[in-house]
Image (cartoon, rainbow, N blue to C red):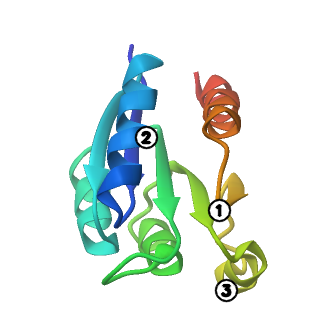
Amino acid sequence: MTQSILIVDDQIGIRMLLQEVFQTAGYCTSIAQDGKEAVEHLSESPYDLVVLDYHIPIYNGNIVMQKMKQMRINTKAIIITGLPEVAKKELGENLPEEIISKPFNVAKLCHTVEKILKKTE
């Protein structure tokens, strides 16, 4: 079965890039441009992984992670942020599988996605 990834970023260029990269790697992808849209996607469909920009409109990455916990959505998460230490501190116990610093290396991100999704197979 094809694994699915939700890509959440407010920058269309990053959403399109990651969607193309993950689809080329054989994953099924969906995209969201803000935290509210991400939570709607996560509540409507099961995903194997969410790749989540931390600083996004409406609900930031921390609020998305909190809402996932409240709704008992057990989707694994990778957070991408320019301020990893701030994100880690704000997230508290709601830590994702990985926090990746911006600017990020696409190949390294793909390797991290592959590693996390191999554990869920």
Q: Is residue 103 above or below residue 120?
A: below
Q: Position of residue 3 (x, y in %)?
A: 43, 25
- In the drawing, what numbered circle is on residue 51? none
Confirm or deny contact between disc 1 and disc 3 (CB under 8 A). no
Q: Position of residue 69 (x, y in %)?
A: 50, 68
The secondary element bearing badge 2 is classed as helix
Gap in angstroms between the C-alphas marked 3 and 2? 25 Å
In the image, taking residue 72 as reference, residue 93 lies left or right, namely right
Q: Is residue 85 left or right of residue 6?
A: right
Looking at marks 1 and 3 on the same chain, the residue that comes earlier in the sequence is marked by 3
Residue at the image point whose x is 31% and y is 84% from the top: 58
Residue located beneath label 1 in the image? 102
Callout 1 amino acid: Lys
Q: Residues within 10 Å of mark 1 (few under 14, many from 20)?
A: few
| Residues at marks 1 and 3, CA–CA distance in whole angstroms | 17 Å
Residue holding disc 2: 18
Circle number at residue 90: 3
- Figure quadrant of the N terminus: top left
The local crowd at label 3, few if under 14, some if 14 to 19, many if 20 or more residues have their Cα within 10 Å, is some
SS at circle 1: loop
Between disc 3 and disc 2, the foreground one is 2
At label 2, which amino acid type do we have? Answer: Leu
- The percent position of residue 38, horizontal first and vertical second, equals 31, 62
